[in-house]
Amino acid sequence: MEGQINVLKDLQSVMTKALTNYKKSPKDRLTVEYIETRLELLENDWSLFKDTKSQLYQTYKLEDVSQKVVDIYDTTEDTYITYKCAMKSALNKLKAKEAIAQQGSESNTMSRATSSLVKLPKISIPTFSGKYSEWTTFYDLFTSLVHNNPSLDNVQKLHYLKGHLTGEAEQLIRHTPITDANYNQCWLQLERRYANKKYLTNCILKRLFSQKRLLVESASGLKELLDTTTDCLSALTNLKIDVSTWDVIIIHIVTFKLDNETRKQWELSISTDSSNELPTFDQFKKFIESRFRALEFIEPNKVHQGSNITHAHSSRAMLATKTSSMLCEYCSESHKLCFCKKFAKQSVDVRREFVAKNKICFNCLGSNHTIYDCKKQMSCRICKKRHHSLLHLNRDVNTGNDSQVQDSATKSVVDSNSTNDSQIIACLSTDKIAKPSQVLLATALIQAESKTGQFMTVRALLDQGSQACFITEATVQLLRLKKSLVRGVITGLGNNRSTTAKYMVNLTIKSKIDDSFQLKINAYVLNKITSYLPENSMDISSFDWIDKYGLSLADPNFNTPNRIDILLGADAYASIIKEGIVRSPTGTLIAQSTALGWILSGLVASSNDKEMQHLPKNISVNCAHFNKDNLLRKFWKIEEQKSSKKILNPVEQRCEELYTKTTLRDATGRYIVRLPFRDNDPACKSGGSGYIAEMRLKTLQKRLSKDTCLKDKYIGVINEYLQLGHLRPVKEGDDKKDQAVYLPHHAVVRDGGKWNSNNQELMKIIDQMKETEGEVEQPGPIKEENKDLEIKLDSTIKILLTWNRNDDSFQYTAYLAPLKTAPVTKRQVKSDIARLFYPLGWLAPSEVLAKAFIQKLWLAGVSWDETFNKQLVQEWNTYRVELLLLTKVRIPRWLRSKFKDKLELHGFSDTSKIAYSAVVYLRVLNAVDRVHVSLLVARIRVAPVKQANIPRLELCGAVLLSRLLIEAAHVLNSSREQVKPRLIPPWYCRG
């Protein structure tokens, strides 16, 4: 018995020590395999312990076994259970971690595999402004991405909702706090307002029924008609409206929108069906699709058929400009009316009558527009008014000098056909000649050096008739070349201006065949040099003679149309050309040896010589002149101080004097101004303003007879004018007075879009124009005052200048729009700053903070819709709050100056790394030698992004101050004796 008891004690000691050692094991040692091994050992020891105990009880009687054996068993069993539970718990945790890690690895592998296949674009939710037509799209996207997203709580959903609302929709829930309970309320409020099924249906049906009728058969027109109809039906289906039985109605509506030929073909197609079944919309849709496919195939291949011979009119590449034939309206010769000598020999009255009768522009004598649409900045050489010099009417009959001046001006106008500017000349001759096939121009593939030193392949056109090289803007951007400013005008035959070259680049080119050949050229930058060359693809089999001679071509794909990147002129052509010419078997095409390879040029013979085409003959003569004196003169003109005083002609001077002398203000505060009529022979009277007004009235009557609604509104407007005293009937004898003037007028309807979208509003306009006279002022409508105009203050920041009558001073009233819940972006900040108002620069210290903040955003690289970081947001919010402090600023309205007081202008300028500024004060010395100083005006400029040193910025501030002093002296309208400008430079202020 003692031996068996000792075995039990040994097993107890082994399991106890094993438990102690397990607890001391480091974490990195506790692996799945380690724990499973210990479990096996524990089970073996426990099995041996139980077997020994069983043998002990089987050998000896129960009463002979001592209590000591029982205690050993209980203690060992407790150790066994504790040890095994600890190891199984640790084992389960390790297996769970391994399973999670394996699952995550598989998920990452699948995610990487999926992302490597395709990268989908980010889905963005459009903003909703309150338009019913936008609600369906916004509702579907927002519901799918935000509203039904379980990972977002209601606070986040409400934040996103407010951030995607603008206009009326944003105002609807603007004042609702962002809380968890308010989201469902706001969403239901929007649904009740804009989920208007009746209104949406009305808009869709209106779009369906208001489609335009096709006048001619057109593939694009049929596409648009079918797409709009299908889109409307789909929209109605989305609104849960059953349109499956609408086929007959839709077909009936759409067939009336078709052109006559397409409608005829449709009726013929359904008439061939012997059955009496009604056509379906699917059948109609298939017919329209087959119809526009056929038209797409036919339309590009249409040819103009003549009476005897069929000519294929094809365009050809124009290297510089295209001159169109121009016929004189007076003599039908090839020149403009303004250069017609026969027209100039006629009297002024005959010229004016001819121009008015043929509806020719009074300003430039062009026939394709009227004087109201004329964009040319020109005026009469005699009186400087807005009409052509040939139409100048001499009103002083008794003076002979004016007639001589007019004759000389007429002669100068007719003879003037040249320019003194430095030009880039490109001449082109276009003759309609019968030629077989097309002309091949010399092209080559070359390598151009980029800014980084790499060479890229571009396509060049070799033109020995050009005296300059050209390069496209796209190629300059590709090579990242540095552009220098130049000025050149590209003109065609007859010295007609076509385009302008503003930049020049320097680049290095080399041959793809011979690496040792490199050439540096100067090229003018144009948006486009010519069209694709050659114009049509050529059969390469007709050029088999090239392989016969073994020529290495400069452009292997010369027969395929492609773009031209560079034009090499005669200056580069001389360095490229080599000896050696090979002619084609027909003799019309030559191959010439160059450093770039063999180039091909000449006439490509057609397989059918009887086929004749009208081809323009291209002759390019480009000449580039660079005048350094003009550029230098342009440089100093930038810094030259321009006079702010406008030079007035006698008529304008008289208007200014009349306004100063006769302008009054009555007791109600209204201004009374006398109109500046001419005393003798007003221009509008001699020009026949009564005739123009009568013709305009007849035209208006015809229009009103066709539109009863417009007629009623027009009559209401006229009656309103009569009641207000703006109009009165013409009395007998009024038209014979010296100052009788007829102002033609017409009714203007501004329908939808700009002012209102659902109704028509009749606008009242009186034309201040004298059409027959040719002296047309800028047309300006006389509109009645908008008394009920209301500005929405909640959409702007307003810094308003007001007058405080208590202390007779100016002060500012500030209104700040509340901060929106949406993130602060550069677009929002720029919009807010643009609304700030700084009269006379009195708020320059505040203005510079706003401008510096914008510059800081620019330097930080913040995009327009990117959210600011916390530091920038805090800086912007601080600036907004500090704007309220401007209400404490007071600026005296009266400068305390009288007529005989001595005035002195004192200017100061200051500079920092952020900005430079200038300020002007007015010092008034009265008769009793009392001095009063007032702030007059200030200007501030932000320092450029490219950092400049302080002395340079100080000079900029001094220039700004000098200009400000000159402007202030002119505005005060004081003599040189009364005003003493004193310029205080920055270095003097520092002592």
Image (cartoon, rainbow, N blue to C red):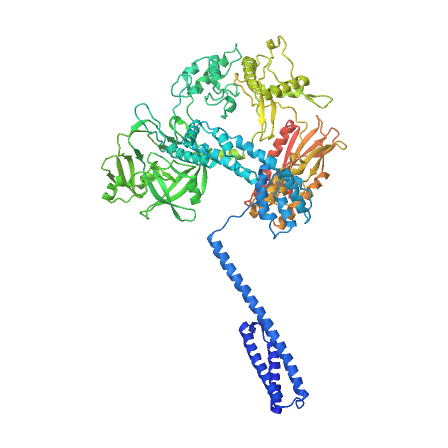
Q: Nearer the viewer, residue 712 or 829?
A: 712
346 versus 442 height, above or below: above
The vertical placement of 365 against 599, above or below, is above
Residue extending farthest to the right is 806
Closer to the camera in the image, 951 or 980 = 951
Position of residue 296 measured from the top left corner of the image (x, y, whole percent):
40, 34
Look at 26% across and 41% down and name the residue there: 541
Rendering quarter of residue 88:
bottom right
Q: Quadrant of the N terminus?
A: bottom right
The spot of residue 668 in percent (x, y) is: 73, 23
Using the image as rendered, state which of residue 535 and residue 661 is in the foreground.
535
Answer with left or right where residue 681 lies relative to residue 340: right
Name the residue at the top extreme.
733
Residue placed farthest to the front in the image? 275
Can you give x and y, in whole percent of width and height, for residue 144 in the image? 58, 47
In this rendering, does residue 908 appear at all?
no
Q: Residue 284 is drawn in which quadrant?
A: top left
